[in-house]
Amino acid sequence: MAHLTYTDAMNTALERLRSVGYEHGRSFVNHAPMAAEALAHMGYADEVPRWVEGHLRSHSFHDVPERRFTIDPADEADWRQALGEFGRVADWTTLFERELAEGRWTDVLARWWPRLLPGMSGMLTHGVIRTAHAVRAVVTAGPDNRMQLAELAHGLGYWAARYSDGGVAVEEHPGGDGGDAVRALDELVAEFSGVYATLSHNHPVPLIHSVTGPAAVRLVVEHLPEAQRWPSYQVARAVSRTMLDWFHAVPRPSAPLPDAPGVADLFAEAVQIGDEHAIKLAEVAVRHEAWAPDPRHAAAAHVANRAIGRRYR
């Protein structure tokens, strides 16, 4: 039996998801493109079509709002007025499709990243997370990356349409270079993995994004100009800290970490559970364990698998 490659799986998933809306229910996010990319990246490409179909069957996705007006990227007053207007998500996506067709994707990313970064907290950072998975898909796909560029346009468009600073206050930190920002983001992901792993959760999902949000920034930051990397870390840190306030979570720095299996086993367990948040957090644990080993990565994924898994029993 032939096995799907990463690119085959992603092309199939993105084609299937082309006309699927961004949200379902009461403004819950469509995680299918992100989880599909995580599965394919982790070597579970054969699982992607089945998982996507199951996800679509279990949710009633809203239609994509119709395109209304052209957004002029050269008119700052025009595009700023459209930030955070979800009814204009199709306008935003069209803008990014056009820019990605006309120029290098890294140039488009570098131009819009600092404009969108202050609104990273919107919809619990799902705009930047979807963008980050799309960036990895573009890089992995190679020269024939049309489907992946279209997904990048959707990620950026969703981020812009759900832009919100959420009352996030970015503290001043001494500046660092690009390498400092990468290392700081690695530590930030480990820090909030430890916070997540040692909290008592009424609901296990919301604070997952205090880990997956900065992990998304870390995934993209090496594709950005060096001058944008340290500000990206500063915003990511501020957003994760603000999430603790939103959900009235008090870190327990002296609490012991739970014993956890290895990260590869945790990802396999997340696939069995089938939940998109478990899959994405476990993939972050695998990724960051390879970059900057720390027991907090596995502990967070283990806690999430155990808590989320109970909902599926």
Image (cartoon, grey):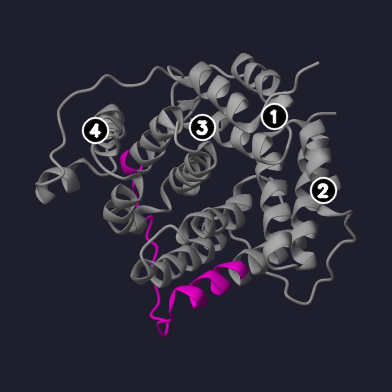
Residues under labels 3 and 2: Cα distance?
Answer: 28 Å
Q: Choose the circle earlier in sequence order: 1 or 3.
A: 3
Q: Which residue is mark 3?
A: 28
Quadrant in the picture for residue 305? top right
Q: Is residue 20 left or right of residue 273?
A: left
Quadrant of the frame with the N terminus: top right
**Where's residue 223, x and y in %?**
43, 57
Q: Is residue 112 left or right of residue 4?
A: left
Residues under labels 1 and 4: Cα distance?
Answer: 30 Å
Q: Choose the circle earlier in sequence order: 2 or 4.
A: 4
- Helix, strand or loop status at disc 3: strand
Q: Which residue is mark 4?
A: 98
Label for residue 264? Answer: 2
Q: Choose the circle earlier in sequence order: 3 or 2.
A: 3
Of badges 3 and 2, nearer the viewer stands 2
Q: Is residue 127 visible?
A: yes
Q: Amino acid at mark 2?
A: Ala
Quadrant of the frame with the C terminus: top right
Q: Amino acid at mark 4?
A: Arg
